[in-house]
Structure formats: structure tokens, C-alpha cells
């Protein structure tokens, strides 16, 4: 086992992270159930693993980026999975957006194997991952943070330290995504009103991007509305999934999220109306339809 980095999960984020690490001249070993994704990265210089067991036999650091709690649990606890093949001294850097309880359970189980866990969900998309410009929301003990520092600095340019308790990173990420989806929804409705009134979209954007109503995602996403480009940087489907996850997390704590519930209903409606694979800012189309009623 050397200091190579394994990446499990080669979707939009995981694949981009793997490419970034390859470009940074690290020895990268990749695995995904999708053979084509493994093959494409092997052509860029990664080592192709045939299984999780194969990957974990040679690496010290393992980065996971997976779509949901069920898939992450299958990777960790399934037959031939992570926990069966974990070795003393390995480190898991977990990037996925999942329930805090999920990563806490994983960390507790891996502690018995002397495997350290860094809870490090990300903010940003594939473009930021390719450039090493992700924001990392990090929770874990100081020794684990120090061990992972070089890798983290290669994939992120902003490292936000939450605390030493695994689970806190995932909690902050869910809170962040609640805010993001709510911001995009209200901005979309407001922008749709302006367009309905007849204001020039470009001029409207130019002014609002300098006023008190602006937000990070208004600045980032509403040029797409002006250009009528709804190709996905982060899809309606993923936005709805993360809102549903936040509501589940709150429910586990006997908390009622009235505003977040309303926001989730809107993303669900947008998803059901055929916008699932478009960018979250495509929710403006739902707002525009409502203005016609």
C-alpha cells in the first residue's frame, strides 16, 4: 500500500476530481460500476481497478463521491466492499451529499479497522472540480485533516473547517443546499416578473447583480437565463433530492421546515414537468408558466 489516491464513483464530480488529481501528477486508481467511466480515465493516466478490493489493495487515501446514501452504504458495507477490504492506516475522504447519520455510522464502523474518515462534502460543480477550485466543507480530527491536506489543496481552493466531529460537514452541506435552492427559487420568480413586465433580461441582470437582492447563485446562474441556456451545472433533479434529504434529516430531529418544504414542492413540480435534467435555474420556467394563469 503506497500513497496513491483511489477514487470510487466517477460521476460528474468524482470523475472531475479524478481528472484533477491525474493532472496534478498523483498516482490515481479509479473504480466505478460503469466500465466506460473507468476506461476513459485510464486513458488519461489513471490505473484501472476491476473492483473495490483491487483499488483498496494499493492505495492509502480513498475518495468517494456517490449519488446518495444507499449507494454509499452499498459501497462501504456491501459484499466485496470498502469495509471488507479496509486496511490499517487507510483514510476515507468522503465528498458525497448524504445524511449526517450515514457518515457517522460509517466512521464508527471504520474506527474498528483503524481507518480514518474525513467528512468533506463539496460546494461547486464539475468545472470547479476540474480546476481545483471546489469549496470543501471539512469535519474530522486534526490528525486526519493534516494527513489529507495535500490532496484537499489539489481539489479545492477554499477549505472551510467546521469542527472535529464527523457528520458536521454533511449537516452544513444540507443547510447550504437548502439556502441555495430557496435563493434560486425566489430569484427566479422575481426575475420572471421583471421579464413579464418587459424589462430587458440583460439589463435586469446587470442591475440586480449589483444590488441588495443579489446572491452567489444569482450571479453564477442567471447569465444562463439571459442566454436561454439551461444545460445543467446542477440539475433540478439533484436539487430536489438534496431538499428531500434535508427534510428527512430535519424530520429525524423532530423539526418542521415550513419554507424548505414549500421550496422542495416547487422543485418536485419542476422535476415532474419535464425539467429534471435541466439546471436548477430552469425553475424560472415554472415561475413563468404560473404568471400566465
Image (cartoon, grey):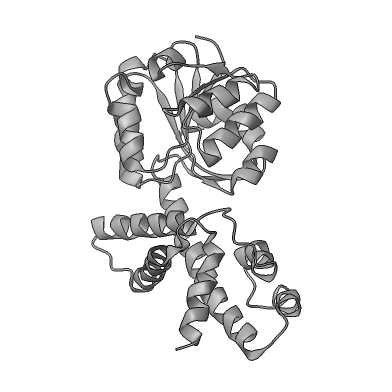
Whether residue 171 is visible:
yes
Residue 214 versus residue 99 in the image, above or below: below
The x, y position of residue 286, in whole percent, is: 48, 74
Residue 263 versus residue 101 in the image, above or below: below
Describe residue 234's horizontal placement relative to residue 229 as left or right: left
Which residue does the image show at 65% across and 45% down from the upper left? 127
Where on the picture, by quarter, is residue 256?
Answer: bottom left
Where on the picture, by quarter, is residue 158?
Answer: top right
The x, y position of residue 38, in whole percent, is: 52, 24
Describe residue 235's horizontal placement relative to residue 157 as left or right: left
Q: In which quadrant will I find the C terminus?
A: bottom left
Whether residue 158 is visible:
no
Which residue does the image show at 70% across and 39% down from the upper left? 131
Which residue does the image show at 40% across and 19% down from the upper left? 52
| Front residue of this view, candidates 254 and 25 | 25
Figure disc tally? 0
Describe residue 147's horizontal placement relative to residue 99 as left or right: right
Where on the picture, by quarter, is residue 242?
Answer: bottom left
The x, y position of residue 56, in whole percent, is: 43, 16
Which residue does the image show at 39% across and 22% down from the upper left? 115
Amino acid at each position: 500500500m503506497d500513497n496513491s489516491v483511489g477514487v470510487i464513483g466517477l460521476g460528474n464530480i468524482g470523475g472531475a476530481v479524478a481528472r484533477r488529481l491525474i493532472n496534478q501528477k498523483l498516482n490515481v486508481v479509479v473504480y466505478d460500476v460503469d466500465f466506460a467511466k473507468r476506461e476513459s480515465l485510464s486513458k488519461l493516466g489513471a490505473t484501472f481497478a476491476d473492483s473495490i478490493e483491487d483499488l483498496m489493495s494499493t492505495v492509502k487515501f480513498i475518495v468517494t463521491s456517490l449519488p446518495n446514501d444507499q449507494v454509499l452504504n452499498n459501497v462501504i458495507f456491501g459484499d466485496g466492499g470498502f469495509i471488507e477490504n479496509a486496511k490499517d492506516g487507510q483514510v476515507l475522504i468522503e465528498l458525497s451529499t448524504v445524511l449526517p447519520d450515514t457518515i457517522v455510522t460509517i466512521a464508527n464502523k471504520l474506527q474498528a479497522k483503524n481507518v480514518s474518515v474525513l467528512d468533506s462534502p463539496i460546494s461547486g460543480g464539475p468545472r470547479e472540480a476540474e480546476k481545483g477550485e471546489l469549496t470543501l466543507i471539512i469535519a474530522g480530527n486534526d490528525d486526519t485533516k493534516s494527513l489529507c491536506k495535500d490532496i484537499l489543496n489539489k481539489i479545492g481552493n477554499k477549505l472551510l473547517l467546521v469542527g472535529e466531529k464527523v457528520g458536521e460537514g454533511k449537516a452544513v452541506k444540507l443547510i447550504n443546499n437548502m439556502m441555495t435552492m430557496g435563493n434560486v427559487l425566489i430569484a427566479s420568480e422575481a426575475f420572471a416578473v421583471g421579464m413579464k413586465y418587459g424589462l430587458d433580461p440583460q439589463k435586469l441582470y446587470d442591475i440586480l447583480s449589483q444590488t441588495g437582492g443579489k446572491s452567489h447563485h444569482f450571479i453564477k446562474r442567471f447569465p444562463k437565463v439571459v442566454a436561454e441556456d439551461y444545460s445543467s451545472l446542477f440539475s433540478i433533479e439533484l436539487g430536489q433530492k438534496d431538499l428531500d434529504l434535508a427534510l428527512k434529516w430535519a424530520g429525524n430531529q423532530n423539526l418542521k421546515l415550513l419554507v424548505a418544504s414549500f421550496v422542495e414542492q416547487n422543485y418536485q413540480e419542476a422535476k415532474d414537468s419535464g425539467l429534471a435534467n435541466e439546471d436548477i435555474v430552469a425553475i424560472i420556467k415554472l415561475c413563468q408558466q404560473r404568471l400566465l394563469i
